[in-house]
Structures are given as structure tokens and as C-alpha cells.
Image: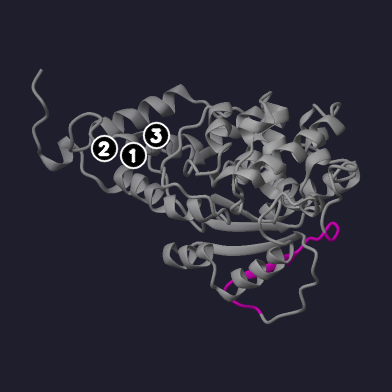
Amino acid sequence: MNFTVPTVADIADATLSQALQHRIDQKTKPLGSLGRLETLALRIGQILGSETPALHAPQMVVFAGDHGLAARGVSAFPSDVTWQMVENFLAGGAAVSVFARQHGLALTVVDCGVRHEFGPREAGAVQLLIRKIAPGTADASAGPAMTPVQCAQALANGAEIVKALPGNALLPGEMGIGNTSAASLLLARLGGLDIADCTGAGTGLDEPGIARKTTVLREVLLKHAEAKAPLDALAAFGGFEIATMVGAVLQAAAERRIILVDGFIASAAVLVASRLAPAVLQRCVFAHRSGERGHALMLATLQAEPLLDLGLRLGEGSGAALAWPLLESACRMLAEMASFESAGVSEKSA
């Protein structure tokens, strides 16, 4: 099958931006005194096309999948942790589960290609969607992680998932042992960077472990030297959860939803999506700079300035959930904070 990239239009609107900035500047405060919250309010208004943007029904979607490359010892944890953590998400015990409950984020978990069969279960607070392409990707050191058909199906699955969800904000997260390797490979190839600079500890490798991981990833890059176009690189390096997330990001962007981007792996999905439709980046708010070695380079490649820098490297969408209240505060500032005129407060004299 073929995947048709949805149209992601340029939403730059100088008139709206000027109106938003004027509204922000007229609030009862010195100019610029709310710092980057003001920049965030401007971005949210631009994305939603409103001087008084309102957030509704935010969707946290965690995409899960296994990686054949994990057999090469690129992770400190075994692949079984992927399905075990999916069960933890569904039981409400993972970090993202806790933060989603705290902030009123609807949580959906998607089996994109986990090496485990999840049995039927009663409907609960967390929705599980089975969109399994295969029980894990192939080993990218031996051949492409995905076939072109599998990659296209994953992209289509991600788009269809978003189409069916309410709300105007998407918070994509992920779970997949070995997926920092896939993200590192995508960054190195699409960003033109040395793999050593893009490769970090992932789930907790020590320095010798990182060195072994880097050697394996360098082999993979050489194996797929011709995979230079975004979808070719995505298929070569995997994984199913990243490809499904790319489709979700593209659809969310086409629908003009806010995309609150988590850490390294979610940013890799945005990198691929933005190479397919550059205006995707107009819809993105980057939640945080993670402690994973390649993430600062990823953010620089995307010309992104994150909201938080807490040394996180958990994934799951946890950093996006932690940043969510800042978006709510930015919207409340625009909608509820008095202006100098409405409050009868004198402005600074000329």
C-alpha cells in the first residue's frame, strides 16, 4: 500500500500574530515580564487560529513496539520490558499514567508491533488499541527494519488513530526497548550528523555499553547507506511505534491540533514528519530537553526551543505531560488576565 501524506498548510498569519502580541502586551504587567509564557501563548494562538485559544480534550497517545535490533545488545533491558510496561500503562502505574491522571489527559496506548499478544480486557480509564503490524521490526543490522508496505501501513494507522480522537491537542509518547537506537539512526541520517554524537545511554547503558551500541549503529548506517529519503530511512531503521507516531503527527498537523512533543524518540518522529511536510513544525510545542545525549542535537536540527530542562530521559510522553500545565496557563493568561484598560490600571508613561 501507499501512504498519502496529508496536506499540512502554512498557517503563518501576520495579522493574527500582531493581534495576539497586542493582546499580550496590553495585559496588566510590564512588557515581556511573563517571559517565555508569552511566547508560548503567541504560539498556541497561532496554531489554533484564535486570539483567545482554548484547549479541549487533550489526547496523550503512547505508541508501543519492539525492535529487532535489540537482539544486538543495544539496550540495558530485555525486549520483554516493552509488553510489561504496556501492562503497567494500562494498570495506571507508569509515570505517564500518573501524570495523565493528574492533568486530566485522556490516555490511549497503541500496540504498533509489540512482541506479545494482549488479551481482551474490560474497558477502563486507559484505552488499548491493537494496530500491530508484526511482532517487532526486523533486525536493522541484517536488513530493513520494515518493508515499504509495513511502513506505509504504520503511517496510515497513526493517521486513522488521530482522526478518531477528539480534542485539539496531541501529546505523543512511546514505549519500545531499542527505540533510542532507531531515533539515533534517524537523527544521524536525516540530520547529517556523526552517529557517536547521536548515541546515548538509552535505558541506562554504561560507557562501554554506549561504545558497543555506537559500533552497532555505525554498522547499520553503512548497511543502509542508500536510505536517505525520509521514508526510506524510516523503513530502514524502524520502528513500528515511531512510524505510527509519524502518521499521527502528520494527521494532527493537518487538523491544526497542537502537538506537544516529548523527548528524543517523539522528536525523531517529528523530524521525519517535518521532512515530509515542513509546516508540521508550526504546530509543535517542544516540551523539554531530555538527558539523552542526542536530544540537544535533535532540537538544534529542528530549531526548537523546549519549555523545560529537567534532565528527564524516561520517554512515555512523561515530559509532555509535565509541560501541559504551562499550555493551560498560557491560554488562561490570554483569556482571563485583565488588560490595563479593563482593570483601570495606568500604563507606563512614555
Residue 339 vertical position relative to residue 98 in the rendered view, above or below: above
The N terminus lies in which quarter of the figure? top right
Mark closer to the chain start, 3 or 1: 1
User: Seen in the image, is 132 located left or right of residue 165?
Assistant: right
User: Seen in the image, is 58 located left or right of residue 334?
Assistant: right
Question: Residue extending furthest front?
Answer: 208
Q: Amino acid at mark 1?
A: Leu
Q: Amino acid at mark 2?
A: Leu
The C terminus lies in which quarter of the figure? top left
Q: Position of residue 301 (x, y in %)?
A: 58, 27
Say which element carries label 1.
Answer: helix
Q: Residue at x 30, y 45 (%)?
A: 333
Q: Residue at x 83, y 45 (%)?
A: 151
The image quadrant that residue 265 belongs to is top right
Q: Is residue 131 magenta?
A: yes
CB of mark 1 within 8 Å of CB of mark 2?
yes
Q: Which residue is mark 3?
A: 42
Segment tinted magenta in the rendering: 123-135
Q: Position of residue 246 (x, y in %)?
A: 70, 43
Real-space Cα distance between discs 2 and 3? 12 Å
Q: Residue at x 44, y 35 (%)?
A: 43
Crowd class of label 3 (few under 14; some 14 to 19; many from 20; radius 10 Å): many
Q: Which mark is residue 54?
A: none
Real-space Cα distance between discs 1 and 2? 6 Å
Q: Which residue is mark 1?
A: 37
Mark closer to the chain start, 2 or 3: 2
